Amino acid sequence: MIDFWFSIGSTYSYLSVMRLAGVQAETGIEFRWRPFNVRAIMIEMDNIPFARKPAKAAYMWRDIERRAAMYNMVPKLPAPYPLAELERANRVAIIAARDGWCEAYARESYRRWFEMGEPAGSEPNISASIEKAGQKPEPVLRQADSDAAKADLAAATEQAKALGIFGSPSFVVDGELFWGDDRLDDAMRWHRQIESGPPD
């Protein structure tokens, strides 16, 4: 199993979130969805990557567009960015990961954000994404706004930091960190190598 650490609000995570189901079906490799708050880590590192850097932001959107085309995805870019409700989106994801509907919620959040222009974490995206995952929005959002959910997201973020994670998406295989959507293939190769064991 590969731990997939992601934060709703990360632009490049769109590419991984939207294709992991297909990758899992094709390869048989299982992914454990691990949401966290990448913004908290980046602020701590004094790393604000795109919002205040127009040239870098323009490159990012074009890069995502190119990579999305390779995966037959059709985002409408640039998407709204940065997200005002990043933490709320990820608190819902923490609840969803615990209760088994994280993948469906995250995928719909990103689909609506990148393909319909609805910022993830805000309405109407957040309620629609919870419903798409088969849940009722009102009780989930009440829970997501609780102090307990805030503490759970903070704890998950501390776990990510302890693993050396500094960005989203990240893939962790037996303690080995692979950062970025473009490192997914490397993570899977490492996973297969571990699964096959040492050579005879």
Image (cartoon, helix red, strand yellow):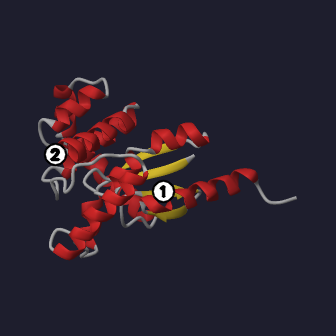
Q: Is residue 171 above or below residue 96?
A: below
Give the residue type at disc 1. Phe
Residue at 20% x, 76% y is 55
For residue 93, what is the image quadrant?
Answer: top left
Q: Which residue is mark 2?
A: 117
Foreground disc of the pair 1, 2: 2
Residue at 63% x, 54% y is 191
Q: Which residue is mark 1?
A: 171
Residue 51 position within the rendered picture, expressed as x and y whole percent measured from the top left = 16, 68
Residue 122 position within the rendered picture, expressed as x and y whole percent measured from the top left = 13, 42
- Mark 1: few/some/many CA within 10 Å (<14, 14-19, 20+): many
Q: Is residue 6 visible?
A: no
Residue at 22% x, 49% y is 76
For residue 141, what is the image quadrant?
Answer: top left
* Quadrant of image for the C terminus: bottom right
Near-viewer residue (18 or 140): 18
